[in-house]
């Protein structure tokens, strides 16, 4: 790294500036720090850096306005946006306005250094990020979990593209919300978004729903009718549960995607299809392809970009924020004061398995808003089915404890006194499982995983090395 490479840190938090400045300096950067965007903008009149790292939420001019002004007057300077308010709007707005990368707080320092180094490499290659400013309402996709931040990044990066997108996720995870967000933050946002759930339409009517029909084309067709492709002209067609589409319809859809035109049922004149396709499914399409239940060529047409939506149990840290949002929304619907969950209630909800995912949590909050007897909601005030689930959870806990007890008894029965102690065998296995689970939950971020486990980061790093888990990172 050449010491002539200059980085600017813009953040009103002194500790963030200090940590980044120290780390970058140790990695060969010349660093200048600013506690406000206005101070940095004033300095731009006299000198320019190679890379800017800026927070979003700051007094005075915010980071997105700074980003916009830098891109307007110095388009070759890569700007990295960081924020503790890691929501969809921040991610999409920063990327649309030309940010090189979006870095949610808290982040690993070595991750931040790697991003800054990549930004310099881009600058040296003279590849510029072209930003498109867009004002849009929040689509209320809430997510601070690392897996949801990846979804936000994908939406932002796809905002300038018309490619097909395949959304994977279990029922209730919010696939249609993500599809709406992809449309809202796309070049087609001024046009219509048309959804169609394949599983909700009778098989013999799917082609008519998609492509429309001419009068007299089948019994009951007393007049011509537009299909969803015509309705979505110039906009986005969202095909939910695409895995339930009949094979004969798959063939027609493939032809539309290949030729850009289609015929109404019973029609003879081709119609142009200027439509972006976003498809979603909770099924394993690759497995359906192997079973010859889904066309492989259609799968590859749809699977240009894939976005995976995590289950609610994979993003438990989002439950308090989601619950607060849904309770507020439900209270507005019934014109009542918003109810509050106690700390114990929030902890209890965060440990539930939520098989119905975000949709189940939203419905639970609606129930609480109407049925909970007081403003402060205790565990005993929750829906009976959740309390029954608590008993099931206790059963699950006792099951793994029983399994451990049985394993220990079996091992002890065959061990000799001079053998290595059982704990020396058991504890590494236990720690290995806990580390793997924590790293999966945090998307491989060691700092966050160490906090979840109750360890220091150095302890986690040492344990990873001792247990031979480096290949997880």
Image (cartoon, grey):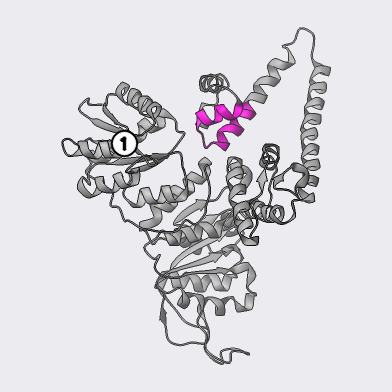
Residue 176 falls in which quadrant of the image? bottom right
Which residue in the protein does label 1 denote? Answer: 36
Is 245 one of the magenta-colored residues? no
Residue under the point 76% across and 7% down: 418
Vertical side of 63 occupied by 294: above or below: below
Q: Main secondary structure of the magenta part?
A: helix
- Position of 8 with respect to 459 (left or right) is left
Screen quadrant of the N terminus:
top left
Single out the residue that lies furthest toward the top. 418
Count of marks placed on residues: 1
Residue under the point 47% across and 47% down: 87
Q: Where is residue 18 drawn, in percent x and y?
A: 36, 25
**Does residue 311 appear in this view?**
no
Is 437 one of the magenta-colored residues? yes
Q: Which residues are magenta?
A: 432-453
Judged from the image, the secondary structure of the residue bearing numbered disc 1 is loop
Q: Where is residue 370 drawn, in percent x and y?
A: 71, 57
- Mark 1, Cα crowd under 10 Å, few <14 / some 14-19 / many 20+, is many
């Amino acid at each position: 790294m050449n010491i002539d490479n200059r980085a600017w840190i813009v953040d009103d938090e002194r500790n963030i500036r200090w940590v980044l400045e120290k780390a970058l300096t140790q990695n060969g950067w010349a660093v200048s720090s600013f506690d406000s965007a206005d101070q940095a903008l004033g300095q731009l009149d006299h000198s320019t850096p190679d890379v800017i790292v800026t927070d979003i939420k700051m007094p005075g001019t915010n980071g997105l306005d700074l980003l916009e002004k830098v891109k307007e007057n110095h388009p070759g300077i890569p700007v990295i946006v960081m924020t503790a308010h890691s929501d969809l709007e921040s991610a999409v707005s920063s990327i649309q306005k030309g940010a090189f990368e979006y870095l949610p707080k808290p982040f690993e320092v070595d991750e931040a250094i790697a991003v800054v180094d990549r930004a310099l490499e881009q600058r040296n290659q003279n590849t510029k990020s072209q930003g498109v400013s867009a004002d849009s309402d929040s689509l209320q996709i809430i997510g601070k979990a690392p897996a949801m931040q990846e979804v936000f990044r994908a939406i932002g990066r796809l905002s300038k593209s018309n490619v097909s997108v395949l959304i994977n996720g279990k029922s209730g995870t919010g696939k249609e919300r993500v599809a709406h967000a992809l449309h809202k933050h796309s070049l087609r946002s001024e046009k219509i978004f048309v959804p169609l759930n394949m599983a909700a339409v009778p098989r013999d009517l799917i082609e008519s729903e998609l492509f429309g029909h001419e009068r007299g084309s089948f019994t009951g067709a007393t007049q011509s009718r537009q299909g969803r492709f015509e309705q979505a002209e110039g906009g986005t067609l969202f095909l939910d549960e695409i895995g339930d589409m009949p094979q004969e319809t798959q063939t027609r859809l493939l032809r539309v995607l290949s030729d850009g035109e289609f015929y109404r049922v019973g029609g003879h004149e081709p119609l142009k299809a200027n439509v972006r396709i976003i498809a979603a499914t909770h099924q394993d399409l690759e497995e359906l392809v192997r079973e010859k239940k889904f066309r492989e060529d259609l799968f590859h047409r749809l699977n240009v970009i894939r976005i995976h939506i995590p289950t609610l149990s994979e993003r438990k840290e989002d439950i308090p924020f989601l619950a607060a949002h849904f309770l507020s929304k439900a209270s507005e619907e019934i014109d009542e004061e918003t109810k509050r969950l106690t700390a114990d209630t929030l902890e209890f909800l965060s440990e539930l398995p939520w098989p119905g995912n975000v949709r189940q949590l939203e419905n639970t909050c609606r129930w609480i808003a109407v049925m909970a007897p007081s403003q402060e909601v205790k565990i005993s005030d929750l829906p009976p089915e959740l309390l029954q689930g608590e008993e099931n959870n206790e059963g699950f806990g006792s099951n793994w404890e029983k399994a451990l007890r049985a394993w220990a008894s079996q091992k002890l029965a065959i061990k000799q006194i001079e053998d290595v102690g059982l704990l020396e065998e058991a504890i590494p296995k236990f720690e290995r499982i806990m580390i793997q689970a924590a790293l999966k939950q945090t998307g491989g971020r060691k700092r966050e995983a160490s906090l979840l486990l109750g360890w220091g980061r150095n302890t986690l790093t040492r344990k990873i090395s001792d247990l031979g888990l480096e290949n997880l990172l």
